[in-house]
């Protein structure tokens, strides 16, 4: 069942001179209940912006230009005793609630979204190591979150829950009375995860959850996230540039480039049945630990600046497969399976299916073969006009 | 690369130590406290042969950057020797040092920090030439700079000469940093995480460039990285560091395909991999890296080690010993105390032992009872402890419950002993490489060493 449905979401950052950075441009994806969905891409591709915009945490000059963020859950005052949206709210045209009870987070005010953060959607921030307040006891910080979002809880109950949460993520409950500086790096990360789980949210947004950690600790945190998901059935939206980590933990993912989703689908399809020139290039460019004698090939050029970009495909300047069409308009998401079986392009109707934004996926076999050839990427100086 | 022994080493590192912060504040002096320096590099020996790319890998704080900086004389070693081309670099005359600085260069991690924002590309690259009085007149210098720029893939050079760093992308900046190192035509370059700040799609280009330049300029690299897959891609030989020690070194492929040191094994298990996906084995290690200010005795890795060695005469399993040893560590660290037992509702000694024998490791290595209880207890009946050890643990747990931690520790220290704690492992040859781990000690060596070192033999078990 779909928990989060992002439709054509565009986010921009205003610049003083009147132009705007198109950090995310007509992005669509959906996250099911209990699944781990990944947004993967290089720095500046818009993945963090996108995640932050879901819960209105953009910087001051950032704004949602258009699009909807349908979330299966609603404000406490709009909900009936089961937590579903009341019929009267659904019928009210002024309230951004849809037939099926999903609420459009993009249409909520900042004050309204505050009631949904933590309770419905919690965030593990990028620098989780610094996310703890140094002058509060770790346990008290969790208690504070519980009391703010579930005011009917007593203090004693909240304290018990905080200790229980810490224990679940592998920290001795005793340590609830310690301060953050008394925790090691891995423990801080665990504490932040415990904190995010404080009000048992339905969706956990983890922004680069392991980037600052050493590899052995990263390993343990990844296991911890997996266990939490099994235990609570929480959906996790992970954002990371680390392709190997994403390949391991995500059920489905979207590969982003220049504010656009280039390819999306099940993780095994993205890596096994790669269908986009950018993803093909990425796969060529990072080493894996298991294979000896690899030849890495980088993608020529650098990522585009997203300041008032022109309408063509965002990747065309670095793409060895670019054709005339690519300059006119960024390609829509095409259904990969369809293109492969019929050899024709059909726009993807199902967000879950394997899709790729490329005009040439009707010649997929050829693209894949050529992409493996180093000369494809190095020989040509790509026409960038 | 396999016949490294036949060639002259370019750099020989012998028993290198670097301690930071050896001085202390006035309060500590007045109170007569011993200074506790950070032991960043603590006894590292390594040979780097001409034409090799040698990788240094390890987690943050293992001393890999400090090691690299000592090799280019950015830090003076506290102890030990570094010989470059046969000459000790700590005892050079001014003239020798000038020559040395031409032959040895460094590439830093962050190209956004390591380039002066107010210098053009030309100024940046020409500066080493001026400082070293290498190319006299302007035209020759300019030609040299242009040539190096084209060598690092920034051509046509005219486009870049007058650019400032902020006009360049990360990949271009790192190429400028490489050009700056190359312009003096060095023999040896220390690269400290040269691509970690770059995006994946750009990384490969810089790495391949470094490989090409190695042939062209006849270079030797020391390649420092926390990213083990990069080490595999780049390096012929590799050294794995942990808390200032070199725990294993040898040909890269051998180390990765068949790690000998328990730390190396854990480190490589922990790396996620696209091909393995969910099949990957997790790292079997407890806890986190301790502080280099107060590192563990003996083998630095023993408190986290999965293969910690039981004392002679231990007739339980190694796993049981590992658990018993973790019990002792928990008491020592204060994780097991009368208060913690009370808050976990543990009243009797047996229950405390069952709680203390748990291991903080990934689920796939845990016992059934641990999994069921969420890691808070084990079933002591299923753990193959020798009866005497079990008694010791229960006694110690009793003492802990009575608040007598010191008594508990004394009891434990007598029975739960390991050579890993008492003796520092020396690097031993093991197949194609050197491993500093007691598991690879020569038989016979052990007794000899422990008796001469005056270390109490393991308490007899009945």
Image (cartoon, coloured by chain):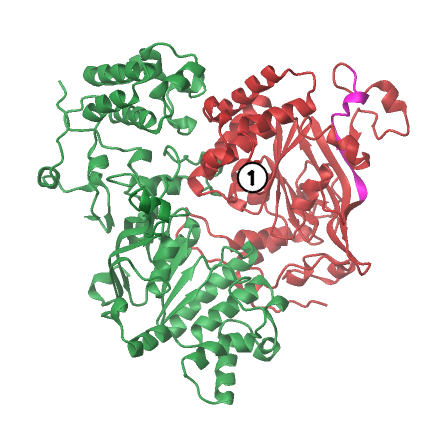
Q: Nearer the viewer, residue B329 or A373?
A: B329
**Residue at 32% of width from left, 45% of height from top?**
B30
Identify the colour of chain A in the image: red
State the residue lying farthest toward the top: B348
**Residue at 43% of width from left, 20% of height from top?**
B371
Is the C terminus of chain B in the top left, top right, bottom left or bottom right quadrant?
Answer: top left
- Residue A70 inside the magenta-drawn segment: yes
Judging from the image, mark 1 belongs to the subunit labelled: A
- Residue A282 inside the magenta-drawn segment: no
Q: Nearer the viewer, residue B439 or B353?
A: B353
Q: Residue B396 lies in what quarter of the image? A: top left
Q: Which residue is mark 1?
A: A128
Whether residue B432 is situated above or below residue B348 in the rendered picture: below
State the image coordinates of residue A151 (x, y, percent, origin top left): 70, 19
Mark 1, Cα crowd under 10 Å, few <14 / some 14-19 / many 20+, is many
State the image coordinates of residue B166 (x, y, percent, origin top left): 62, 66
Q: Which residues are magenta?
A: A65-80
Whether residue B165 is situated above or below residue B316 in the rendered picture: below
Q: Is residue A34 visible?
A: no
Relative to A320, is B239 on the left or the right? left
Identify the colour of chain B in the image: green
Q: Is residue B380 visible?
A: yes
Q: Nearer the viewer, residue A360 or B12?
A: B12
**Residue at 51% of width from left, 68% of height from top?**
B175
Q: Secondary structure at mark 1?
A: helix
State the image coordinates of residue B65 (x, y, percent, origin top left): 39, 56
């Amino acid at each position: 069942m779909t928990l989060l449905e992002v439709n054509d979401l565009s986010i921009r950052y205003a610049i003083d001179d009147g132009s705007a950075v198109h950090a995310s441009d007509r992005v669509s994806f959906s996250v099911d209940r209990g699944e781990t969905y990944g947004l993967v891409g290089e720095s500046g591709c818009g993945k963090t912006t996108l995640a932050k915009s879901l819960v209105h945490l953009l910087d001051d000059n950032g704004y949602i230009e258009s699009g909807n963020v349908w979330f299966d859950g609603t404000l406490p005052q709009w909900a009936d005793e089961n937590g579903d949206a009341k019929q009267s709210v659904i019928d009210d045209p002024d309230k951004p609630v849809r037939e099926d009870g999903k609420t459009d987070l993009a249409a909520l005010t900042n004050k309204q979204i505050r009631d949904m953060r933590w309770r419905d959607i919690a965030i593990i921030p990028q620098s989780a190591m610094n996310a703890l307040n140094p002058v509060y006891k770790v346990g008290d910080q969790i208690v504070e979150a519980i009391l703010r979002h579930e005011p009917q809880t007593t203090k004693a109950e909240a304290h018990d829950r905080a200790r229980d949460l810490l224990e679940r993520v592998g920290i001795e409950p005793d340590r609830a009375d310690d301060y953050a500086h008394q925790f090691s790096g891995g423990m801080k990360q665990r504490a932040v995860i415990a904190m995010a789980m404080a009000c048992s949210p339905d969706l956990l947004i983890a922004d680069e959850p392991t980037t600052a950690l050493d590899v052995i600790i990263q390993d343990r945190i990844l296991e911890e996230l997996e266990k939490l998901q099994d235990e609570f059935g929480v959906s996790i939206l992970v954002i990371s540039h680390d392709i190997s980590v994403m390949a391991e933990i995500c059920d489905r993912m979207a590969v982003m480039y220049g504010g656009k989703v280039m390819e999306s689908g099940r993780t095994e399809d993205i890596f096994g049945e790669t269908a986009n020139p950018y993803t093909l290039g990425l796969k060529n460019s990072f080493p894996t630990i298991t294979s000896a004698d690899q030849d890495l090939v980088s993608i020529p050029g650098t990522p585009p600046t997203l300041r008032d970009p022109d309408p063509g495909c965002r990747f065309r300047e670095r793409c060895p497969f670019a054709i005339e069409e690519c300059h006119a308009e960024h390609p829509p998401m095409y259904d990969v399976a369809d293109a492969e079986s019929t050899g024709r392009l059909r726009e993807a109707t199902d967000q879950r299916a394997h899709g790729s934004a490329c005009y040439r996926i009707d010649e997929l076999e050829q693209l894949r073969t050529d992409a493996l050839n180093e000369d494809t990427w190095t020989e040509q100086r790509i026409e960038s006009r | 690369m396999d016949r490294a022994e036949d060639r002259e080493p370019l750099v020989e590192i012998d028993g290198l130590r670097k301690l930071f912060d050896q001085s202390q504040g006035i309060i500590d002096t007045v109170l007569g406290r011993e200074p506790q320096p950070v032991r960043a590099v603590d006894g590292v020996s390594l040979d780097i042969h001409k034409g090799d790319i040698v990788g240094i890998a390890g987690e943050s704080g293992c001393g890999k950057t400090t090691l690299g900086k000592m090799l280019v004389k950015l830090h003076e070693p506290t102890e030990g020797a570094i010989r470059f081309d046969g000459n000790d670099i700590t005892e050079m005359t001014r003239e020798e040092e000038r020559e040395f600085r031409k032959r040895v260069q460094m590439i830093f991690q962050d190209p956004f920090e390591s380039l002066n924002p107010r210098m053009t590309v030309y100024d940046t690259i020409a500066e080493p030439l001026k400082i070293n009085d290498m190319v006299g007149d302007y035209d020759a210098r300019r030609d040299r700079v242009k040539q190096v720029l084209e060598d690092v893939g920034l051509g046509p050079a005219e486009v870049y000469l007058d650019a400032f760093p902020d006009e360049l992308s990360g990949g271009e900046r790192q190429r400028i940093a490489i050009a700056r190192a190359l312009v003096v035509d060095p023999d040896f370059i220390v690269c400290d995480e040269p691509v970690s700040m770059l995006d994946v799609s750009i990384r490969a280009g810089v790495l391949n460039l470094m490989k090409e330049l190695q042939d062209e300029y006849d270079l030797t690299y020391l390649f420092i990285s926390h990213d083990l897959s990069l080490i595999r891609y780049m390096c012929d030989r590799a050294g794995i560091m942990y808390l200032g020690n070199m725990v294993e070194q040898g040909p890269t492929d051998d180390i990765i395909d068949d790690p000998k040191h328990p730390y190396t094994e854990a480190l490589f298990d922990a790396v996620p991999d696209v091909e393995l996906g969910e099949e990957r084995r997790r790292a079997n290690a407890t806890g986190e890296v301790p502080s280099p200010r107060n590192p563990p005795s003996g083998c630095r890795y023993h408190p986290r080690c999965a293969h910690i060695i039981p004392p002679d005469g231990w007739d339980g399993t190694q796993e049981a010993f590992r658990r018993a040893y973790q019990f002792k560590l928990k008491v020592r660290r204060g994780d097991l105390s009368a208060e913690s037992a009370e808050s976990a509702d543990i009243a009797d000694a047996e229950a405390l032992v069952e709680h203390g024998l748990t291991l903080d490791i990934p689920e796939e290595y845990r016992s059934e009872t641990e999994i069921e209880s969420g890691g808070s207890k084990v079933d002591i009946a299923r753990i193959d402890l020798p009866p005497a050890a079990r008694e010791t643990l229960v006694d110690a747990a009793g003492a802990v419950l009575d608040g007598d931690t010191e008594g508990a520790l004394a009891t434990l220290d007598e029975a739960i002993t390991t050579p890993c704690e008492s003796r520092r492992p020396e690097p031993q040859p093991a197949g194609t490489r050197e491993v500093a781990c007691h598991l690879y000690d020569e038989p016979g060596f052990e007794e000899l060493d422990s008796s001469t070192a005056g270390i109490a033999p393991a308490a007899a078990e009945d």
